Amino acid sequence: MTVILFIAGVLVMLVGLGVSIALHELGHILPAKAFGVRVGQYMIGFGPTLWSKRVGETEYGFKALPLGGFISIAGMYPPSPEADGRKKRIWSTLVQDAREQNDETIAEAGDRTLYRLATWKRVVVMLGGPFMNLLLAVAIFSGLLSGLGVMQSTTTVASVSECVVAAGAERTECESGDAPTPAAEAGLRPGDTITTVDGTAVSTFAEASAIIRARADSTIPVGIERDGSAQTLQITPILAENEYTNDHGEVVTGEVGFVGFSPTSERVKQPLWAGAQQALDNTVAVGEVIVQLPVKLYDIAVDLFTGQDRDPDGPISVIGVGRIAGEVAATEAPIVDRAAFLLNILGAVNIALMMFNLIPLLPLDGGHVAVALWDGIKRLFAKLTGRADPKPADATRLVPVTLVVVVLMIGMGALLFAADIFNPIDLFGR
């Protein structure tokens, strides 16, 4: 059964990735078609075509390797200049091949080409893919946070500790001579709901806990609701070493006020803007990873060969994503918790797809945006100086640089594949 659940988790994540990639490419196609540009192909995956169907002028289909997507937009670059007849070097040959492929799309489209569009339209077309990933991430996080809700500790008491056990002690049961906890001594019971602490209304366990931590050795009134009626207990928190979450969200240990009860947990639905905030937080986190990418990859290589534990916040490949999804699906947690974890992963993956594609290097979307902006700057300068419009930038000249970027991406992918197979990230302490 565990194996079946593992496989199911992997398949669910692969389908989610496929949908994310499909929507990314759709984000390019929709504005391109809206601006009148000819789109020849819309393919999910790479390699041999498994299935395709032509609808109008566009061929839609699936290829054998579902690791990306491909669309053919006519005239990404201007027509190639006349050949000069000189002996070609390898770089020149690569440039010429790219120009010939681009010229084929122009021949089919006539004037309906991308390079003829206004700069802002070209930018919209190229940003459409990353923007679609952002929208999908916000939708996923909104459904997760505002639909399913987030597990939070409530003010309802789950259990009351009978005695105070010294911090660090291995035993969990009370012995004769142990002092009763302030909660037990005051008569707090499981099922009670705390409504006020020292005169302050509280709606979360964190709010109640923060007041209690600051009231050591002071007797304070604690308002509760028990069996539908309101009551007030007098509780005196003792000063004890305890583990708690501070105002910065960090789990720390220190001497604070302690009363000795545990809260229940339930899913609490968050406000509608929580999904967008989660997407923003993920964007910042992924941006930090991208900025430190060379260092992160070096650390992954070192960990791979030394067997050290990997940084769980570092980059992973599709293999790593699938492995984590399978492990989550195979746990014994409630199905809603497993679904929430998988949705959170898929939302984070879409943010990663968006941010990675925004890197201003060809062949990534950010590289095409940079070329379009450069064209726009040249046109603006020509207009301000009263000159004729310059020719569009011939980005095929950057094919050698593009090839270097592709080789580096392949190398990064190979390293992450190897790390995710032989030294995977351990999120569950196994």
Image (cartoon, rainbow, N blue to C red):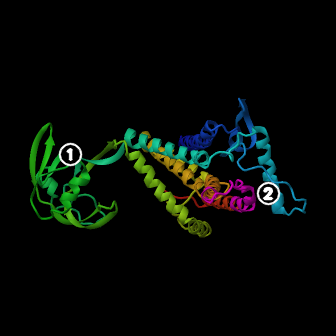
Label at residue 30 = none
Magenta: main secondary structure equals helix
Query: What kind of residue is marked 1?
Result: Pro
Name the residue that disc number 2 marks: 95
Q: Which of labels 1 and 2 is toward the front? A: 2
Foreground pick, 429 / 104: 104
Residue placed at 73% from the left, 56% from the top? 394
Question: Of all residues shown, which one is farthest toward the top?
Answer: 56
Horizontally, residue 110 falls left or right of residue 430, namely right
The answer to whether residue 154 is above or below residue 306 is above
Instruction: Find residue 75 and report its image quarter.
Output: top right
Query: Does the rendering let one see residue 395?
Result: yes
Instruction: Find residue 248 and report its image quarter.
Output: bottom left
Query: What kind of residue is marked 2?
Result: Val
Indicate yes or no whether the magenta region holds residue 401: yes
Figure label count: 2
Q: Position of residue 238 (x, y in %)?
A: 16, 63
Foreground pick, 50 / 219: 50
The answer to whether residue 211 is above or below residue 43 is below
Q: CA distance from mark 1 to mark 2?
A: 74 Å
